[in-house]
Image: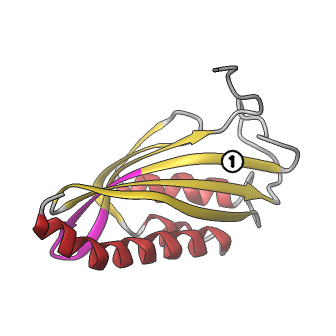
Amino acid sequence: MTSTQAIYAPLADESIRNLIKNQTDAWNRNDAKGWAKDFLEEAGFINVRGDLVKGRAAIERIHEFIFSGPYKNSHCSVSIDSISYPGQNVAIVDTSAEVTKFNCLPPGLVPTSPGSLRTRFKLILTNGDSGWKIFAAQNTAVVPQPMPVE
């Protein structure tokens, strides 16, 4: 990190943490518009099933669907594992999330543990005239049994 980025990072960190908090709060309200609002218009999102969703409008639509069905009234908690800055106007954010109180899981998914789906959510953000926005994101389910790596 350059000295400019080191000075810049604390302010950016706060803005990015607020974005993640607002997105999590929107999930817990089943608010698809609020959840998708910080994606750029042309953003790409790979959801937990591996589906590629292109554009903020499509990201909002898929969340309207899941919030009215499988994840209706679910609860999401998110912790930020890291924020890094490969460039002054680019941030990569790694989070760990847990969804509980879901009605069911979409086809192909299994709970990480009974009643819980944990995921790792990576976001690539850019900073422009309207502040930090999500350019791309990928959500990956944490499977019930880790690989036996020594």
* Residue for point 52% across, 74% down: 21
Residue 87: x and y in percent read 16, 55
Question: Which residue occupies the foreground of this view, 9 or 130?
Answer: 9
Main SS class of the magenta portion in the image: strand
Residue 105: x and y in percent read 76, 43
> Which of the 4 quarters of the picture holds residue 142?
top right
- On the rendered structure, is 127 left or right of 121? left
- On the rendered structure, is 93 left or right of 8? right
**Magenta stretch, residue numbers:** 123-133
Question: Which residue occupies the foreground of this view, 55 or 111?
Answer: 111
Q: Which kind of residue does numbered mark 1 sit on? A: Arg
- On the rendered structure, is 7 left or right of 16? left
**Residue 136 lies in the magenta stretch:** no
- On the rendered structure, is 26 left or right of 12? right
* Residue for point 11% across, 69% down: 4
* Quadrant position of the N terminus in the picture: bottom left
Which residue lies under the disc numbered 1? Answer: 118
Under circle 1, the secondary element is strand
Can you say whether 15 is above or below 94 in the image?
below
* Residue for point 54% across, 51% down: 62
> Which of the 4 quarters of the picture holds residue 6?
bottom left
Instruction: Name the residue at the right extreme.
Output: 114
